Amino acid sequence: MHSDAALLPDLSTWSSLCVTPSSSAAPRSQACSRSAALTNSHLPRHSDAAAPSLSVERTIEHFVYGGGDDQHVVIFGATAENWATFCATQAENFDAWTVLTVTRPDGSQKVGWQGTGLHVLVWNLPADICAEAPDYTGTARLVLADSDLDLSGHGADGTGQTGTGTVTDASGQRYRLLWVNRSTVAVEFTSDKEPFVFDTHMFKIQLTPIGE
């Protein structure tokens, strides 16, 4: 991660973000804030100590993830109350995500984050997301994937994000929420400690009324 911003600024120009974590083991192309991870297991795929092995680690992490286009801002992983508290005090009380980290023999890592039953908040733009209540609230499932977390692998890095859920506005109207983000980092970028460029192939936030 490259930003240390504690609070989200104006998101109207952001495509994908999260409130920044202190560790690199979080989705890139985010602006992610999270609580400390709780490591559950480390499962080596091979037992041959003489050679590097593929390993798999499963963890539970707590963070908030989101982004915006020119019409909406979406935050996954926080209730409206917890988000307002975070904006005011930076106190984190976010939803849990399951994280699967695969470490290859060359040391590069493929990571997936899955949030199920996440609280989700949506604002219509323009909006100040730390001063105004969300226009829609509900729950969603979001899956994030990064094929080369620190860009140390041999190929281009690919990231994918797919989220679906249901939200409700103040009138009680329900909407299907769709979040899709696909991007790559070219193979010439070999470290996330140095500047690199995301090539975004698709970014979509879609709200579809239910029953209309």
Image: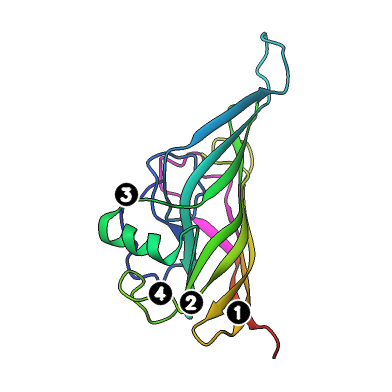
Determine if residue 7 is in view: yes
SS type, badge 1: strand
Q: Residues within 10 Å of mark 1 (few under 14, many from 20)?
A: some
Residue annotated with mark 3: 4
Which residue is outermost to the left?
89
Residue annotated with mark 2: 72
- The dot on residue 207 is 1
Residue at 54% across, 44% down = 188
Upstream in sequence: badge 1 or badge 4: 4
State the separation of the CA atoms marked 2 and 4: 8 Å
Q: Are circles 1 and 2 on residues that touch, CB within 8 Å?
A: yes
Which quarter shows the C terminus?
bottom right
Residue annotated with mark 4: 12
Q: Is residue 91 magenta?
A: no
Upstream in sequence: badge 2 or badge 4: 4
196 vs 5, nearest the viewer: 5
